[in-house]
């Protein structure tokens, strides 16, 4: 379990593919809400 936000970011960087990272970078902020119950919950639980 991650101890702080930087550890969560490192874990995301290691787990996400380059394609997934590119998708996150290009997704409009208002559309990121669609990730709430998947990626968002994972981040919360870390």
Image: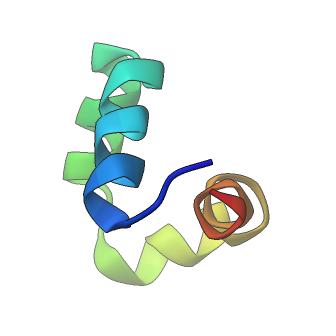
Q: Residue at x 74, y 54 (%)?
A: 38
Q: How many numbered callouts?
A: 0
- Locate residue 15 relative to residue 14 in the image: left or right: right
Q: Nearer the viewer, residue 17 or 32?
A: 17
The quadrant the C terminus occupies is: bottom right
Q: Is residue 27 left or right of residue 30?
A: left
Question: Residue 37, how many percent across, how many down?
Answer: 79, 66
State the image coordinates of residue 10 (x, y, percent, origin top left). Answer: 29, 38
Q: Nearer the viewer, residue 42 or 28?
A: 42
Against 8, is 10 above or below?
above
Q: Position of residue 13 (x, y in %)?
A: 30, 31
Q: Residue at x 63, y 48 (%)?
A: 1
Q: Residue at 63% of width from left, 65% of height from top? A: 40
Q: Is residue 42 above or below residue 15?
A: below
Judged from this view, the residue extending furthest toward the bottom is 30
Height in image: 36 above or below 43? below
On the image, the x and y values in percent for residue 12 come to 41, 38
Q: Is residue 44 left or right of residue 9?
A: right
Q: Residue visible at 57% across and 77% down?
A: 33
Q: How is the image coloured?
A: rainbow
Q: Residue furthest front?
A: 3
């Amino acid at each position: 379990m991650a101890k702080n936000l930087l550890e969560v970011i490192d874990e995301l960087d290691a787990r996400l593919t380059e394609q997934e990272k590119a998708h996150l970078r290009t997704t409009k902020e208002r559309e990121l809400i669609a990730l709430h119950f998947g990626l968002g919950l994972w981040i919360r639980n870390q």
